[in-house]
Image: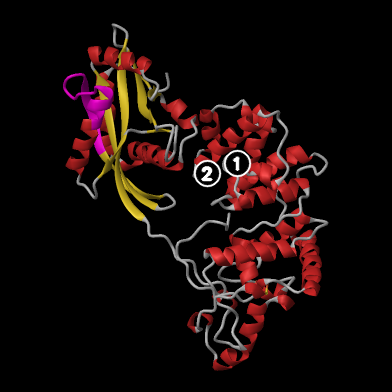
Amino acid sequence: MSGGEKNENHEDVKKKPTKGEKRRGRSPSKREPIVDIEDIMFSIDKVQTMRSSLLDWYDLSHRDLPWRRLDKGQPETRGYGVWVSEIMLQQTRVQTVVEYYKRWMHRWPTVQHLSRASLEEVNEMWAGLGYYRRARFLLEGAKLIVKEGGEFPKTVPDLRKIPGIGEYTAGAIASIAFDEVVPVVDGNVIRVIARLKAISGNPKDSKLVKQVWKAAAQLVDPSRPGDFNQALMELGATLCTPTSPSCSTCPVFDHCEALSISKDDSSVLVTDYPAKGIKTKQRHDYSAVCVVEMLENRGTSELKQCSRFLLVKRPDEGLLAGLWEFPSVLLNGEADSSTRRESINSLLSKSFGLEPKKNFEIVIREDVGDFVHVFSHIRLKIYVEHLVLRLKGEGSKLFRKQEKKSISWKCVDNKVMSSMGLTSSVRKVYDMVEKFEAEMISPSRAVATKKQRATSTNLSCRSC
Ligand code: SF4
């Protein structure tokens, strides 16, 4: 959401074409770069009419979202709700956020409630939303606010002291919940203002972003700063979209220089403004994931068997910190099945003392498939394998002993697996294995597999 991020690509910012350029029909990308963008500011009379046009349009047309229904008479609760929604909305679509937001606010309706939660509970609630650092920042922020007396910060400088709150989020909370007359600039606002002023520069260029903040500060309505900021962002999200703006229904079309230029010159489109951002090149990583399912005999009669899945907790720092996942190893690149199995065997031996033949018997070992999971800058190809083991008597004891000692891994049954908050990639791996067992194995193999399990013990108990 924040448009204030730094960008190393200092592409020159270009200004609207002169009359001569328009006559020559040069597209913005072909014009000479012009670095002076001081004229991005609006004239006083335009500011007044744009404020009232945007607010009128917003009052009539804004989307009904749960965080917009927060009681204006309770600014602290409103501040907390706006904070949660803004953090959730970073890098995530509105439609996705709505249900997460409702569940979160139902469970932790105030900052005090949230401050008493654990990281694991917060991560579970966040599961599937991605960018888990955001959830941790919310928790850390709530703890900090409560530690310092419990009063929700109301101004941009105070909000900036909270972990994970940058200039954009601080401006959004301060203006929407506490009526502070400050601007907000996200990607939508940059696009709208770049089009209103026909600026064709790189929208991530720091000079352009700085100027957009200035223009947004000039535009913000002093009597309704929160509504005005939301109106500008709403315009970018719903009408002035990246590829198909609805200029005919735009409340500020008569102030839009990009539209005016494109009407004069059919070779210029409003979508030429601003320039397309330069995408960061993604890194390609590869990993092998092993869903280890353990059939464990219990009792001397060996009449009862439990199946449990091995989960490993990620380190408390870094990507997906503190979350549970299946054992996995990063590979050096594309790898064949035997290379992947070697890597997995080494991991199981070193980390869990699991040695085939010595303390377990392999019941099933199958490659289930692979898929690509995209993080912000990483394209991770994940190979999934299903390994069903039957622990031998001594191995079973050894495994339980280690489990007590360590807090970094645990074994859970399939009931717990189904109800746990898992990241979307872990959930996908689990679903693949479930599907593989249920549908992908041919009927004859399925019968064979059932028989294998049945002969392992007399009674299978996957949910104990
Ligand atoms: S007229 Fe079109 S391009 Fe200009 S601000 Fe409105 S929607 Fe965007």
Q: CB of mark 2 within 8 Å of CB of mark 1?
A: yes
The percent coordinates of residue 125 (x first, y second) are 55, 35
At x 38%, y 23%, the residue is 411
x and y, in percent, of residue 450 in the image: 29, 28
Residue density around tag 1, few if under 14, some if 14–19, many if 20 or more, within 10 Å: some
**The residue under label 1 is which amino acid type?**
Tyr
Q: Which residue is mark 2?
A: 129
Residue sitting nearer the eye, 395 or 228: 228
**What residue is disc 1 on?**
100
Q: Residue furthest top?
A: 300
Query: Type of residue at label 2?
Result: Leu
Question: On the rendered structure, is 311 left or right of 415?
Answer: left
The answer to whether residue 451 is seen in the rendering is no
Q: Secondary structure at mark 2?
A: loop
Crowding at mark 2 (Cα within 10 Å: few <14, some 14-19, many 20+)? many
The boundaries of the magenta stretch are 347-366
* Cα separation between marks 2 and 1: 8 Å
Determine which of the numbered discs, if any, sits on residue 407 in the image: none
In screen coordinates, is 364 left or right of 108? Answer: left
